[in-house]
Amino acid sequence: MTNGEAMRYEFAYEILEPEKAFSFDAAITADDEGQGIEGVSLHFGGRRSFGTAATGPDGTWSKDGTRGTVTVTAARPGWTFDPASRQVTGPGANVSFVGSRQLTVTPRALQMSTGPSKCTACQESSLL
């Protein structure tokens, strides 16, 4: 300021609307049967966590009170899900998953014998 002159400041601002909460629901089904998968844990994350939910006996689930962009991830031991996660930005979005059982192979020890085999399957397959 010089000689009693006042300085002028201008400010610009934007009023942001709060994000509105939304709810959604869907189902998780098995790819080989199309039946719902019970006991699948769902995690709801994004800029903040919205907790978890679990599927019921018919594979359905619901979540209330989410806001903004939410990433939904499904998990259950022994299963993989397609897609691995989904991003949801509001109600009405497709948040369904299809599950596939993971195959686990358990190795078995073969019992060896020095005498004639009594295993007909082994004799037929020419393993002896």
Image: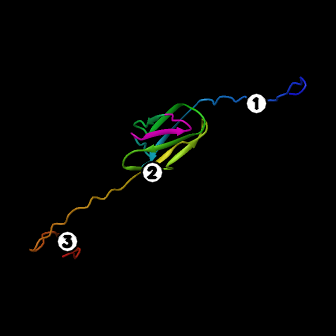
Identified at 15% across, 66% down, the residue is 111
Outermost residue on the top side: it is 4
The image quarter containing residue 57 is top left
SS of the residue at dot 2?
loop
Kind of residue at disc 1: Tyr
Rendering coords of residue 15 (x, y %): 72, 28
From the image, tell me which residue sits under label 1.
13
From the image, tell me which residue sits under label 3.
122
Question: Is tag 2's residue or tag 1's residue first in the polypeptide sequence?
Answer: 1
- Which image quadrant: the C terminus? bottom left
From the image, tell me which residue sits under label 2.
31
Question: Is tag 2's residue or tag 3's residue first in the polypeptide sequence?
Answer: 2
In the picture, the disc for residue 117 is none
Rendering coords of residue 126 (x, y %): 22, 76
Magenta stretch, residue numbers: 38-50
Q: CA distance from mark 3 to mark 1?
A: 82 Å
- State whether residue 41 is above or below residue 127: above
Q: CA distance from mark 2 to mark 3?
A: 35 Å
Q: Nearer the viewer, residue 8 or 16?
A: 8
Q: CA distance from mark 2 to mark 1?
A: 51 Å
Q: Nearer the viewer, residue 9 or 91?
A: 9
- On the picture, is 110 further left or further right than 102? left
SS of the residue at dot 1?
loop
Question: Is tag 3's residue or tag 1's residue first in the polypeptide sequence?
Answer: 1
Outermost residue on the left side: it is 115
Kind of residue at disc 3: Cys
- On the picture, is 126 further left or further right than 23? left
Comparing marks 2 and 1, which lies closer to the viewer? 1
- State whether residue 107 is above or below residue 36: below
